[in-house]
Structures are given as structure tokens and as C-alpha cells.
Amino acid sequence: MVERVIIMGAAGRDFHNFNVYFRENERYDVVGFTATQIPDIDGRIYPSMLSGSRYPDGIPIYPDSRLVELIRKRQVDLVAFSYSDVPHIEVMHKASQVTAAGADFIIIGAPYTMLESKRTVISVCAVRTGCGKSQTSRHVVRLLQKMGKRVVCVRHPMPYGDLTRQIVQRFSSRDDLVSQHCTIEEREEYEPVIDMGAVVYAGVDYGLILEAAEKEGDVIVWDGGNNDTPFFKPDLHIVVFDPHRAGHETGYHPGETNMLMADVAVINKVDSALPEKVEQVRRTIATHNPAATIILADSAVSVEDPSRVMGRRVLVVEDGPTLTHGEMAYGAGVIAARRFGAASLADPRPYLKGSLVDTFDRYSHMGTLLPAMGYSPGQIKDLEATINDCPCDLVLSATPIDLTAVVRVNKPVVRVRYTYADNSSPTLEAVIRKRLKDRL
């Protein structure tokens, strides 16, 4: 009997799970995806050129709020949970809703969905959004470049636009970011890697993406998204931890899976975290994955001219996902404001425009800072208007990109940069060389 399936997702892992697990499997009939976490990604169709010959009309993408209704209306047999950075308790609440409505609930095993590569693969993932995964992956790219390797970075998917144009995306210059209509969130991940002289691939069909990346690179660096597991089978799996959120490593899906699979565990932000929280994370790793090599790292925060920050009233703009579903109350921008002597933080909440009002309503833990939300042109305009209406001396921009290339700001902007730095021995380079001595 053919089982009718809904895949729960957020325009990333859900599409990959469909492609590798369900697309050609005649046991299943996928009747829809549900979408959550990212604004405006429902109401689309997963197109026939991606869904294959068994789905000539494509597959509809519904809002997650309709899940129970759809199970009953479409007589669904199975629901596959396929998105990340979710509290364990919320996953089980979803499972309860699904099973009460009459369907089975599954989470597909992480190794089962990993594609094997002919090249050496180093994956960099995390236990939560905002741990410092991307700065760590950039450090890995830099180390491999220093070794003389041709490095290709493959990023976890962010296909929030026209899926037919995002099947395989290649980025090697800032012009590519413009021509492919990248969101702020995409730019934050691609732009810093491009500036290092590396090529970035992303998109929807990671089988095709892997084929393209293998033609260009000796080594592939998988740059994970949220706290998701890799789409490619790694030869070395590096997982980043955040002692500012000690305890989260065992409380979120699938971050705990990453911890249990880690070859290398990087405890980041040691320079700004409480020592007892660093030790708490270290004990957790040692208890649950004693085979992992533990590395301590700093997230080195800097600004070009600290005197511009001293004594000023600043509006801090932080990385969006870190603050929203990452649940951080602050990021590198607030750390920089405190470290370099800002007089006060401007409160953007009285000046919020459009979609940002809804964002602050949904994520009420955010206070006197502004997430760089930019999933759509309308949201970018809301961000621009909010910044320009908020009274302050300057904008302290802690998004990884040049914010002024995306929005027109009517006040000075000072960029905050944060980079990976080894805190002690062993260093990440030493561990990579030792672990992959026969592969590099």
C-alpha cells in the first residue's frame, strides 16, 4: 500500500529529504510540504522539474498551521519532521498532534540522507543557530587555502525565492549576489566566503550541487545552517558549541545529534562567556561523546575605529536568525558596544515598521537591538525605514555583510567584525592536519 506523506520543513532540509528519500520511492506519495520558521515561504509549489516524473504538477507547500487539517483532509499516513533548531519538547508536541490526527511521525536518520563525495569533505555544523559556525567554517577554508588546496564551500540551503532558478547556485563574486537576488540572510553567509576568494555553492538539489562542487574543488567544506546535520558524508565533522547557552546542546533538535556525531567539538566564545559555563559545556561533551576532540576558541570582536563608538548612543543591528529562532538576547554587536564604551543602546521598538512589528511580537525576548531581517524586498525596506527613523548617533552593524550595500542609511555606520581565534591548544589546524593526514 502506498503511504500518503506530508513533509514538515522550512525550505531546506525538507526539500533535501524529499530528494534523497521520497522522490523516487514508490512506497510513498508526498501530498505536500508544510513551512514554518522563515517568513513567506509557504504558498509556493515545489516544482515538477525538482519533484520528478511522479509529481508532474509539483507539490504544494502549505503553512505549518494547517498540518492537522491536512492530515485529516488528505488522509495522510506519515509525517516526516524535517527542519532544525527546534526544542525537543516542541518536536514531541508536533508528534503528539500528528499521531492524535491519525498519522505516524518520523525523523529520518541523519547518516541516511548524507550524500557520499569523491572528494574530502569537512563539515562545520553547530548545536544552535548563532554559535559561530560560519566564522569557524571560514577559518577552515582559510587553513585549507594556506595548504594550497582548491576549496569549495557548500552552504546549507536557503531557497526562499523562485525554486526553478535556485536548483544549483554558484557564487564567486558580489555581482553574483545581485544577479541571483540574494536575501540579506543569504548574503550574510556567501559574501564573507566570496571575499576570501573561495567559491560557494547552494540551492535545492544537493546531488547536482555535489557533482558541480567536485569538479572545482579538492576539498569541500560543508557550511551548515541552523543546527542541522550535514547533507554530505563528512570525513571530519566539526561541531560548534556556545557557552552563552550552556545546556542547549542537549535540548534542541538536531543539535544534540550533531554533538553525538562530532569528531571535533569547538567550544566558541570562550573570551566572552563565564568560565563555569565553558566548563559545563565541556563536561556535557565529555559525558555524551568522549571520543570527540574538544577545542576552545574565541569569537574575536573588533571594529575599525573604536573611538567612534566611545560615548555614543548606538543602534545595534545584529544577525537576524541568531536573535529570532536562535533565541539569543544579544550578539556580537552588543558585546562590541559594551567593550568599546558606547554610552547607551538606542531602542528601535517605537520605530518598527511593517514586518518588523510582527517579528518583535513573535520573538519577545529581543530588546534594544535590531535583527537584520531581510528575507524579501519588503522586509528590507522595513529594516531600512526602521533604522532611519530610530534616533541615534550611529549604527553599529554586526551583520557579517556590508549593510550599506543593501539599505540606504541616513546616519554613520560602524561595522563589527567577529572572527574565529584559537584560545588554547590543540588548535583547529593541528587537529585537522592530524585527523586528515591521509586525506589532505
Image: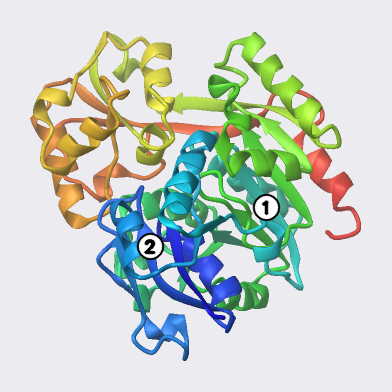
Graded by Cα atoms within 10 Å as few (under 14), some (14 to 19) or many (20 or more), the crowding at tag 1 reads many
Q: Which percent across, then down, holds residue 402?
A: 33, 44
Q: Which mark is residue 123?
A: 1
Q: Nearer the viewer, residue 68 or 371?
A: 68
Query: Considering only order in the chain, which callout, 1 or 2, is on the residue closer to the N terminus?
Result: 2
Graded by Cα atoms within 10 Å as few (under 14), some (14 to 19) or many (20 or more), the crowding at tag 2 reads many
Amino acid at circle 1: Ser
User: Marks 2 and 1: which is nearer the front?
Assistant: 2
Label 1 sits on a secondary structure element that is: strand
Residue at 62% over, 73% down: 210
Which quarter of the figure has residue 10? Answer: bottom left
Count of numbered badges drawn on the protein? 2
Residue at 79% over, 43% down: 263
Q: Is residue 37 left or right of residue 429?
A: left
Q: Which percent across, then down, holds residue 399?
A: 37, 38
Label 2 sits on a secondary structure element that is: helix
Amino acid at circle 2: Ile
Q: Nearer the viewer, residue 381 or 105?
A: 105
Disc 2 to disc 1, C-alpha distance:
35 Å
Q: Which percent across, then down, holds residue 330?
A: 39, 23
Q: Is residue 156 visible?
A: no
Q: Which residue is mark 2?
A: 71
Residue at 56% over, 71% down: 206
Q: Quadrant of the C terminus?
A: bottom right
Q: Which percent across, then down, holds residue 25?
A: 59, 81
Q: How is the rendered protein coloured?
A: rainbow
Q: Does residue 207 lie above or below 377 as drawn?
A: below
Q: Does residue 144 lie above or below 134 as drawn?
A: below
Q: Nearer the viewer, residue 348 or 400?
A: 348
Q: Does residue 269 lie above or below 318 as drawn?
A: above
Is the C-beta separation of discs 2 and 1 under 8 Å? no
